[in-house]
Image: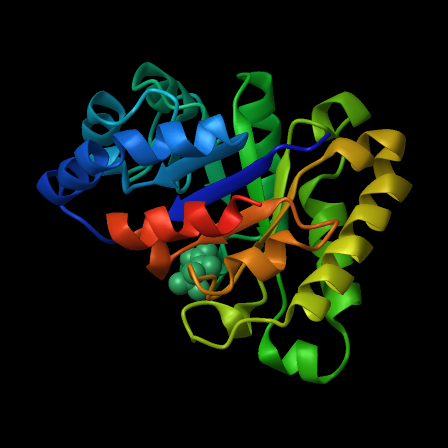
Amino acid sequence: MRKKLLLGNWKMNKTPAEAKEFALAAGEMVDFAVAHDIEVGVAPTFVCLTTVKENINPKCIVAAQNCNEHASGAYTGEVSIGMLKACGISWVILGHSERREYNGETSEACNAKIKALLANDMVPVYCCGESLETFDKGETKKWVAEQIRTGLAGLTPEEAAKVVIAYEPIWAIGTGRSASKEIAEDTIGFIRRTLRELFGNVAVDMRILYGGSVKPTNVREYMSAEDIDGALVGGASLDPVSYKGLIEGMVA
Ligand code: PEP
């Protein structure tokens, strides 16, 4: 049985003071989610991780939005997995389309980070998704399959089982144009079949999230799809009232 997961991606938003305000406001809603068997989390910027971790309900996952695969050294501007662990962080989002576009993060680079995270008992949330051009050409599945094969290359089934996948069509991120439930369901079903080809039966228990303009008003529809195990949410995760609406929408 796959537990539903709501993960808020705060991107480059909130100062530590603003992040603390959210963290303090989130206590009861996290309890409400957990009581309904839903895992919830937020992914603040690096500078807010400690503040959020120290002030939020401990049942809430606090994730980073990136990491470096090297243990330490001359990597200016980077943050290591050991540093995140020292801050009590054990989840990391990787391969978000914004990082792929603006920071040149490739599926190969994500693969190295995923391996390093798993070696440190951390949970990678690996994002995949196609551009509008690829979608319009009808090549979504080919594109996403390649991202999955490369990002998860060399993992054992036991390792793959620990990875959370997020399918986020780029044309739906921050645009207000969400993918229909049918499109999300179709691609996520395909991703699960691809994972099954690669890793066998563990794919049945792997969590695959949908992301792209998910809001309190449409989250319930996605959650009614058999293969969709939760949501990775950007804009609508920033405000505690909206975040609460997302949780309420996820409760069956
Ligand atoms: C995201 O940042 O992963 C995302 C899905 O953003 P939004 O919900 O704003 O489309």
Position of the N terminus by quadrant: top right
Q: Quadrant of residue 46?
A: top left
107 and 128: which one is in front?
128
Residue 38 x/y as whole percent = 52, 34
Is 105 placed left or right of 53 in the picture?
A: right
Residue 246 x/y as whole percent = 42, 51
Q: Looking at the image, which residue is at 25% across and 27% down?
A: 56
Q: Looking at the image, which residue is at 36% across and 40% down?
A: 43
Residue 68 showing in the rendered view: no
Q: Is 120 above or below relative to 97? A: above
Residue 29 showing in the rendered view: yes
Q: Quadrant of residue 52?
A: top left
Q: Is 34 above or below relative to 190? A: above
Outermost residue on the front side: it is 252
- In this rendering, the count of numbered labels is 0
43 and 3: which one is in front?
3
Q: Is 70 above or below relative to 244? A: above
Q: Quadrant of ligand 1?
A: bottom left
Is 157 placed left or right of 234 in the picture?
A: right
169 and 106: which one is in front?
169
Residue 24 x/y as whole percent = 18, 32
Q: Looking at the image, which residue is at 48% across and 43% down?
A: 6
